[in-house]
Amino acid sequence: MADSDPNSIRPLTSETNAVESRPAEFVDAADTASLAPGQGRTLELRGRRYALFNLDGQFYAIDDSCPHRGGPLGGGYFEGCEVYCPLHGWPFDVRTGQCRTVPARTVRTYPTRVENGKVWIQLVASPGPTSVGDS
């Protein structure tokens, strides 16, 4: 198929994501100093809610909404690598999005990076572990 064919299949690159097939974009989300280790919170970026967590100096971002009843995960109890939904206590690993109670019910994870004292979140979902150390 020719490159100009709108139905041609494009190979995936580091600049695209298989889920949403659009360029990946990092957005300034928070100052690192505003989220101490062991804390999490909800952020609204571009009209969507995300939960951001500081796990021993590594930052992780997931969808803020629990897949069970929509509880705000950024407001949940955060211990170890898990956040507990404030509505019914479902535990989610902030590194992977996996739910320990109901493994089939995951939340999306989003890559993060830290630069110059800022946490940046990539707004295109990622399928795996997502924290990138200080660049």
Image (cartoon, rainbow, N blue to C red):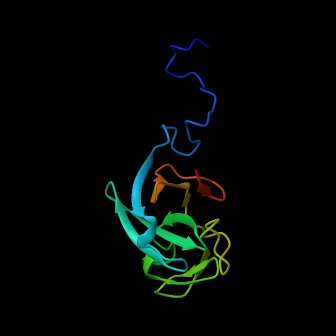
Q: Position of residue 35 (x, y in %)?
A: 45, 73
**Residue 45, above or below 80:** above
Looking at the image, which residue is at 48% across and 38% down? 22
The image quarter containing residue 16 is top right
Q: Identify which residue, 3 or 75, lies in the foreground.
A: 75
Q: Is residue 89 above or below residue 23?
A: below
Viewer-side residue, 56 vs 109: 56
Q: Is residue 62 left or right of residue 29?
A: right
Task: Provide residue 85's location: percent of width, then percent of height.
Answer: 51, 82
**Quarter-of-image position of residue 72:** bottom left
Residue found at the very far left of the displayed protein: 47
Question: Position of 98 compared to 76: left or right?
Answer: right
Residue 116 visible in the shown view: yes
Rendering coords of residue 63 (x, y %): 48, 65
Residue at 43% x, 81% y is 75
Residue 103: image location, x then y, percent: 68, 72
